[in-house]
Image (cartoon, rainbow, N blue to C red):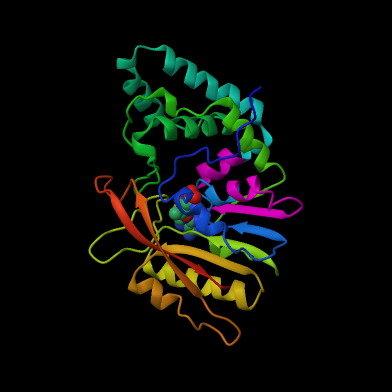
Amino acid sequence: MTTAPEAAPVLRWPGGKRAVIKQLLTGLPEFDAYYEPFVGGGALFFALYNAGLLKGREVFLSDLNGEVIDLYRALRDDFDDLLRGYDLLVATYTRMNPADREAYYYALRDGDVAPLPRIRRAARTLFLNAAGFNGLYRVNSNGKFNVPFGDGNVARLKSESALVAAARALQGVKLRQCSFVHVTPTRHALVYADPPFADVPGKKSFRAYTAEGFSDEQQAGLADWCARASSRHGAHVMASNTDCKLIRALYPSTFMATGHWYIERVKVKRSINRDGKGRGGVGEVIIRAWR
Ligand SMILES: C[S@@+](CC[C@H](N)C(=O)[O-])C[C@H]1O[C@@H](n2cnc3c(N)ncnc32)[C@H](O)[C@@H]1O
């Protein structure tokens, strides 16, 4: 008998947090709602779901990237239609001569998405992410997905059982396409903020998830937002970012009369940096309002 797989990210996402899940799950406080305002691939969301920690709790996932949120909506609400659309793309791709796959990918990537129904667009997002280069999700300054073709390995395409598991986890979840500034966590909620990372001196971090990018001013705005969510709204706030001077200055160890930021340093092996060439260890921090 085969057992259903655990829920896991259906998107390969730059900056995805699978590599630090253990650390993120350690020492979590009691919470009654969960907010993830930079959800991306949702590594922590799926891990919390698998651990049974979201049972009976309201879950709010948001991201400025509309393609991600539309895909999660389709998984949550229109699973059969999504699967039909996705299966069609996958079946055509896997059956064709491998030499033709690259042209098929580019035709789909560069075709006009505007006339496509919502569910077809979601199927396209899922397919392009699996078939594109190295799991990179990147848009140009007009917000157009511009990742080159990957290695043609069909094993990277998501299986139906993986999609079923993700769709199950998303039932009842509130989804919203918006900037973090429009999210207001409630008292006793757990909040995980995982923004595009600040630059390390001499090295640009990847931030082309949206046409808007993410500036140092936005990093400062996010640090204020985290402090407010923690001290004013009484939420349990945790954030990830680059281990660098800017972030240490924005999350000082005394940020309000009643609390502190506690900083844990973690070393993470990342496969993608800004230009997709460099690989290696990146210093990251996990910032928490509890010890
Ligand atoms: C580091 S990724 C999150 C990765 C995610 N934790 C995971 O495990 O896959 C950062 C996310 O922030 C989103 N983003 C960028 N600017 C934003 C903004 N102003 N408000 C909300 N989300 C934003 C990006 O679309 C991207 O999905």
The residue positioned 37% from the left and 45% from the top of the image is 139
Measured along the vertical axis of the image, is residue 215 above or below residue 252?
above
Q: Give the residue at the far bottom of this rendering.
A: 257
Between 190 and 39, the one lying in front of the other is 190
Q: Quadrant of residue 234?
A: bottom right
The residue positioned 66% from the left and 38% from the top of the image is 76
- Whether residue 205 is visible here, answered yes or no, is yes
- Residue range corresponding to the magenta coloring: 46-72
Is the N terminus in the top left, top right, bottom left or bottom right quadrant? top right
Between 148 and 109, the one lying in front of the other is 148
Measured along the vertical axis of the image, is residue 123 above or below residue 262?
above
- Whether residue 64 is visible here, answered yes or no, is no
In the rendered view, does 106 fall on the left or right side of 69? left
Provide residue 100's location: percent of width, then percent of height. Answer: 32, 16
Is the C terminus in the top left, top right, bottom left or bottom right quadrant? bottom right
Residue 60 lies in the magenta-colored region: yes
In the rendered view, does 211 fall on the left or right side of 176? left
The residue positioned 69% from the left and 64% from the top of the image is 30
Between 141 and 5, the one lying in front of the other is 5
Residue 213 lies in the magenta-colored region: no
Provide residue 146's location: percent of width, then percent of height. Answer: 34, 39
The residue positioned 39% from the left and 31% from the top of the image is 109
Query: What is the total number of numbered labels drawn onto the structure image?
Result: 0
Provide residue 236's location: percent of width, then percent of height. Answer: 62, 68
Q: Give the residue at the far front of this rendering.
A: 1
Q: Quadrant of residue 217?
A: bottom left
Provide residue 185's location: percent of width, then percent of height. Answer: 65, 65
